[in-house]
Image: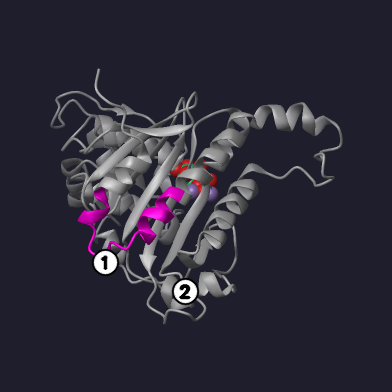
């Protein structure tokens, strides 16, 4: 039997590979893992809290109102970042503006974290997989000062690390620091993330496509052509692909990481920039996809080179197996 490698052991072993290895990034990744375990626990009892405890007036023992899980997750991660001492500020999908931490310790933090605390919110109430997505950058502002908007608006190719947590049939944490992608599964009996998917590679091609086809008539004609191609006997596989759409980007992305596939959330006539957020969803998953040998584009341009202009900026998103993304792009006008 081979030895179990926990996430913390793995992080420490890999620290030396890292150009600015002073331990702060390692501590930050460990803080994320602790927050992820707490959120995972809350996700696992979501139905109980809503339907049993919530029936008594929706307040907990401290008299606080029961909160929606995405607010709970947001607060849990912010707490971890604010008190960890490595992070000077954050931006989250759940907050209108970025948050610059004001404590002296936090102002000395080297990093900013941008994150989607709970991805796939519409799946919370129906017991379908959801996730957390995060992206870490070195600050560009001076150490010792408060974080600035410029710290948050860096292009994706400046990311130091990125990852996601999938609260699925098991809880997994997958991350990259730019030296490949590794996946860890939470063993609830020992409360540790254990290395289960070393050096993850996205298959070069696959036969699964994921998109909300309800939007097909309001998409660029290139998308219609690509979906027709996926459904045709004349495609590269000689048989129709399978359509799979969970509606939680993390879960659709994770499946494609393992089995090969493409995920598309295109611009539409009603939302030309699509739905997904560049800073909290597309950049971190694009970094992971590229590190695993996949591709991530807007249908025309590489996601990671976009210079963000706004915190909540949206972009069309094509991500997954390299050959599939290339084929979809070749049909875009
Ligand atoms: P969030 O729950 O963080 O707002 O993100 C939801 C996103 C993504 O996870 C999912 O793939 C997509 O929205 C689903 O959108 P549609 O319902 O429009 O298909
Ligand atoms: Mn999301
Ligand atoms: Mn969300």
Can residue 105 be spotted in the picture? Answer: yes
Mark 2 → mark 1, Cα distance in angstroms: 28 Å
Q: Secondary structure at mark 1?
A: helix
x and y percent of residue 34 in the render?
A: 50, 44
Q: Is residue 140 above or below residue 326?
A: below
* Classed neighbour count for the residue bearing mark 2: other residues with Cα under 10 Å, few (<14), some (14–19), many (≥20): some
* Mark 2 or mark 1, earlier in chain: 2
Q: Quadrant of the N terminus?
A: top left
Q: Secondary structure at mark 2?
A: loop
Q: Quadrant of residue 256?
A: top left
Q: Which mark is residue 27?
A: none
Q: Quadrant of residue 59?
A: top right
Can residue 210 be spotted in the picture? Answer: no
x and y percent of residue 158 in the render?
A: 29, 66
x and y percent of residue 50 in the render?
A: 73, 32
Q: Is residue 236 above or below residue 218?
A: above
Write the residue at 26% across / 44% down.
181
Q: Nearer the viewer, mark 2 or mark 1?
A: 2
Provide the residue designation for mark 1.
305
Magenta region includes residue 220: no
Provide the residue designation for mark 2.
108
Please give left or right for residue 35 compared with residue 309 in the image: right
Q: Which residues are magenta?
A: 14-30
Is there CB contact under 8 Å for labels 2 and 1?
Answer: no
Magenta region includes residue 18: yes
Q: Is mark 1 within 8 Å of ligand 2?
A: no
Write the residue at 58% across / 69% down.
97
Q: Nearer the viewer, residue 225 or 19?
A: 19
| Magenta stretch: dominant secondary structure | helix
């Amino acid at each position: 039997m081979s030895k179990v490698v926990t996430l913390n052991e793995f992080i420490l072993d890999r620290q030396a590979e890292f150009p600015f290895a002073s331990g702060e990034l390692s501590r930050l990744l460990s803080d994320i893992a602790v927050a992820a375990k707490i959120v995972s626990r809350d996700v696992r009892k979501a139905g109980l809290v809503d339907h049993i405890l919530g029936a008594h007036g929706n307040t907990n023992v401290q008299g606080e109102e029961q909160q929606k899980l995405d607010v709970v997750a947001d607060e849990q991660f912010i707490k971890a970042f604010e008190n960890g001492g490595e992070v000077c500020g954050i931006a989250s999908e759940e907050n209108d503006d970025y948050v610059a931490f004001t404590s002296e310790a936090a102002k000395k933090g080297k990093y900013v974290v941008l994150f989607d605390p709970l991805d796939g919110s519409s799946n919370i109430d129906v017991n379908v997989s959801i996730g957390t997505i995060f992206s870490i950058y070195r600050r560009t502002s001076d150490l010792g000062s408060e974080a600035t908007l410029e710290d948050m608006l860096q292009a994706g190719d400046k990311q130091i690390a990125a990852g996601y947590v999938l609260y699925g049939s098991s809880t997994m944490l997958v991350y990259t620091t730019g030296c490949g992608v590794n996946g860890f599964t939470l063993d609830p009996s020992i409360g540790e993330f254990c290395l289960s998917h070393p050096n993850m590679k996205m298959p070069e091609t696959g036969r699964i496509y994921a998109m909300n086809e309800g939007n097909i008539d309001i998409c660029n004609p290139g998308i219609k052509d690509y979906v027709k191609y996926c459904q045709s006997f004349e495609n590269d596989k000689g048989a129709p692909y399978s359509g799979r759409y969970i509606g939680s980007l993390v879960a659709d992305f994770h499946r494609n990481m393992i089995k090969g596939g493409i995920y598309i959330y295109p611009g539409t006539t009603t939302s030309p920039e699509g739905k997904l957020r560049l800073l909290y969803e597309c950049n971190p998953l694009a970094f992971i996809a590229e590190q695993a040998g996949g591709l991530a584009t807007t249908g025309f341009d590489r996601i990671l080179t976009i210079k963000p202009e706004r915190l909540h900026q949206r972009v069309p998103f094509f991500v997954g197996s390299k050959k599939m993304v290339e084929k979809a792009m070749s049909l875009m006008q």
